[in-house]
Amino acid sequence: MNIRLSPMSGALLLLLCLNGCAQNRTLAPPPGGEQVSVVVKVPQNLTAEPMQVMYRSEKCPIKRSGPDWTTYEEDGYLSTTVQPQQQGQSGLYEAKLPINGGSRRQWQLSNVTFGVTYANTTHFGENVKAGPGGGVIVMFDKHLPQQRSAFQPTIEVNGDVLISKDYYPLVNEQFIGRHETRAWLFGEGEIYLYYRASDARRVTFEPLLHANYALYSVEPKVQGEGYTRYIYPDGSVVADGR
């Protein structure tokens, strides 16, 4: 998939392979069309993740099968990845997403998945990988996003969206399945926060990282033997299954 910027209009032209419709279609937003500005304020030692953007079209339906083997149609979709751009020397990263995707399919912005992750994990120890957490999904229509948690509610917002949430490092070492250590961003919700804001034209995410309050967890090495051991920022250790 290629992403091209038109120097004449500044419109985002996305060439991609589309399943369920026609292949090699071009998403061509009209010049001067409305946009949604998505801004992420990135704390030190974190980085802005690439944004996963989905568009939908009533003119490009997809056939689905129901649990009783009946068939039905839903709006077709296409997705692309957009890299937010740093604003000067600041910690602000922004991407402007066209609402009207244009073309004969009349693509419309459906949702965007974005967030922050660790840019550097060496201060947690050797071979520590960046884990999940610190993600946000904003929906602009009635459809559910491609990634959905059954346990996390959707927050309905009128107008623009400002998200300011606290996050803490959670460094988890696991042994069962495979041995690896990951640094999560632990906060409200699970991996993602969910918002629906159909008329938003600006979405701002300001994660607040409390880097000095790291929680370490070490899982059992054998299935069914012992409990996960938690080491809290004050040095206390708990391994009683609570």
Image: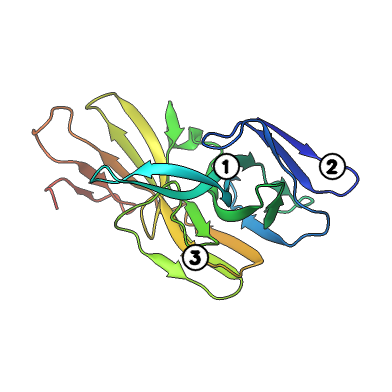
Q: Residues within 10 Å of mark 3 (few under 14, many from 20)?
A: many
Inter-mark Cα distance, 1 to 2: 20 Å
Q: Earlier in the sequence, mark 2 or mark 3?
A: 2
> Farthest residue toward the front?
70
Place of residue 201 in the rendered image (x, y in percent of width and height, measured from the top left): 66, 66
Q: Secondary structure at mark 3?
A: strand
Q: Spot the residue most to the bottom.
A: 158
Q: Secondary structure at mark 2?
A: loop
Q: CA distance from mark 1 to mark 3?
A: 19 Å
| Residue 166 rendering spot, x and y as whole percentages | 46, 61
The amino acid type, in three-letter code, at marker 3 is Arg
Q: CA distance from mark 2 to mark 3?
A: 30 Å
Callout 1: helix, strand or loop?
Answer: strand
Q: Nearer the viewer, mark 1 or mark 2?
A: 1
Q: Residue at position x 24%, y 45% from top?
A: 67
Choose between 218 and 235: the one closer to the eye. Answer: 218
Question: Going from the N terminus, do you reach mark 1 or mark 3 first?
Answer: 1
* Residue that numbered label 1 is attached to: 78
Q: Position of residue 190 (x, y in %)?
A: 36, 53
Whether residue 140 appears in this view of the structure is: yes
Residue drawn at point x = 55 percent, y = 49 percent = 114
Looking at the image, which is closer to me, 15 or 48?
A: 15
Query: Disc 1 residue type?
Result: Leu
For disc 3, the marked residue is 196
Q: Residue at x 43, y 68 (%)?
A: 155
Would residue 185 appear left or right of 21 to someone viewing this image?
A: left
In this rendering, does residue 95 appear at all?
A: no
Horizontal side, residue 100 vs residue 188: left or right: right
**Up-down: is 209 above or below 129?**
below
The residue beneath circle 2 is 6
Residue furthest right in the image: 8
